[in-house]
């Protein structure tokens, strides 16, 4: 009997969002169990308000802790968390990732976890630590992340953790944002940021797309989202300059800046939109979990197109048509305009 179940998901926002179907399936299968998630401070708000969890344990990655004092505080807090989890003593621990998770195994061992379930490399000699229940790592490009995490629940007799992604907007934050926005018949979320250079479409392209939307959709309001900060910030590069360029190019009250300061604000703001436009990333998966239509820009890579596409929502994906050019900058404005028309006409 699994009385206490711990899901470890240590990585990025979209990865954790894609784990929510598994969390829901665990709650359905084990309604009386205590179910908890171990996550990091960067992605923890993804689980705010999730009714399928009894506990969310949060630690801070050292790279997010700042200077020496911050790192010391983060390490001290992590030691307290380890002690707390050792007292909690999960009966089953799931390393929720589509591949081998060495750091997750090590952390699970530190807290004295039992029945650790995880994927392992095909060559076990390459693994420095191994879970107790070892599943062969699936081919990354053949499965969606949701499907890969579903496979980790097979030892618990669960094979249907394939439901929709789930996040929950804070109603108080939603109400506060609504008060600040002009009334609109329809809203489009336009997200212009991407961490990796190969996922960046370019400011001029986004300006042209926003102008097209304003010209062809007179009753539609655009909410502009971006990662706050300066582009040359070595730790958290942002797109303040790019966002300002869009706002300068499209004056008026139909392009509204949304400089969200945290994930709670981002989720609440996205919940007010009808459609999301942006590159593959955390914000896209949050919009998917809010059941929005998605127009997504992807790199021309099977490993991305087959593994991270918008899960179980109406969507269209655009990517470059030249097989030897993989990055998003190769996507044409005409491609987005055509796909957008299809989605808006439905």
Image (cartoon, rainbow, N blue to C red):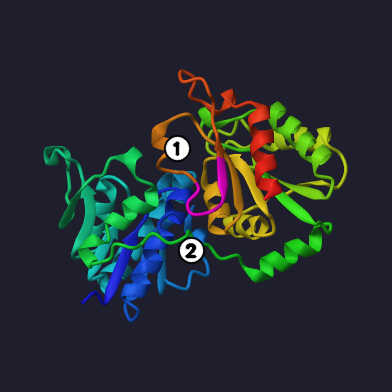
Image quadrant occupied by the N terminus = bottom left
Of helix, strand and loop, which one carries label 1? helix
How far from the left and from the top, in percent, is residue 146? 38, 53
Which segment did they paint magenta?
310-316
Residue drawn at the location 21% of the way across and 60% of the way down: 116
Looking at the rendered image, the disc whose residue lies closer to the viewer, 2 or 1, is 1
How far from the left and from the top, in percent, is residue 296? 57, 40
> Quick check: 5 left or right of 126?
right
Which of the 4 image quadrants contains residue 159? Answer: bottom left
Determine contact: label 2, label 1, CB under 8 Å. Answer: no
| Residue farthest top in this picture | 324
Give me the disc on residue 305.
1
> Quick check: 301 left or right of 93?
right
| Residue farthest left in this picture | 125
Give me the disc on residue 230.
none
Question: Of marks 2 and 1, which one's residue comes earlier in the chain?
Answer: 2
Residue drawn at the location 40% of the way across and 71% of the way down: 55
Of helix, strand and loop, which one carries label 2? helix
Residue drawn at the location 49% of the way across and 45% of the way down: 66
Query: Is residue 73 at all visible to an observer of this figure?
Result: no
């Amino acid at each position: 009997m699994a009385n206490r179940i711990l899901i470890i998901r240590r990585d990025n926002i979209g990865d954790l969002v894609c784990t929510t179907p598994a969390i829901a399936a665990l709650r359905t299968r084990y309604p009386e169990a205590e179910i908890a998630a171990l996550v990091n401070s960067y992605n923890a708000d993804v689980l705010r308000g999730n009714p399928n969890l009894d506990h969310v344990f949060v630690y801070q990655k050292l790279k997010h802790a700042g200077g020496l004092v911050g790192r010391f505080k983060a390490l001290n807090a992590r030691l307290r968390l380890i002690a707390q989890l050792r007292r909690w003593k999960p009966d089953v621990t799931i390393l929720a990732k589509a591949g081998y998770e060495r750091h997750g195994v090590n952390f699970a061992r530190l807290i004295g976890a039992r029945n650790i379930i995880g994927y392992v490399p095909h060559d076990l000699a390459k693994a420095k630590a191994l879970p107790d229940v070892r599943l062969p790592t699936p081919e990354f490009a053949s499965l969606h992340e949701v499907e890969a995490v579903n496979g980790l629940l097979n030892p618990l007799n669960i094979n249907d953790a394939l439901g929709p992604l789930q996040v929950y907007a804070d109603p108080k934050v939603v109400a506060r944002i609504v008060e600040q926005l002009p009334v609109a018949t329809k809203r489009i979320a336009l997200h212009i940021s991407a961490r990796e250079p190969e996922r960046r479409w370019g400011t001029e392209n986004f300006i042209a797309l926003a102008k097209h939307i304003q010209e062809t959709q007179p009753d539609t309001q655009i909410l502009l989202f971006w990662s706050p900060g300066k582009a040359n910030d070595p730790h958290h590069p942002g797109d303040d300059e790019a966002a300002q360029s869009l706002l300068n190019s499209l004056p008026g009250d139909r392009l509204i800046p949304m400089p969200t300061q945290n994930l709670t604000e981002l989720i609440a703001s996205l919940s007010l939109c009808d459609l999301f436009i942006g590159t593959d990333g955390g914000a896209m998966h949050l919009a998917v979990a809010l059941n929005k239509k998605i127009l997504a820009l992807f790199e021309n890579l099977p490993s991305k197109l087959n593994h991270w596409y918008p899960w179980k929502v109406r969507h269209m994906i655009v990517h470059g048509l030249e097989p030897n050019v993989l990055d998003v900058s190769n996507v044409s404005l005409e491609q987005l305009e055509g796909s957008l028309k299809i989605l808006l006409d439905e």
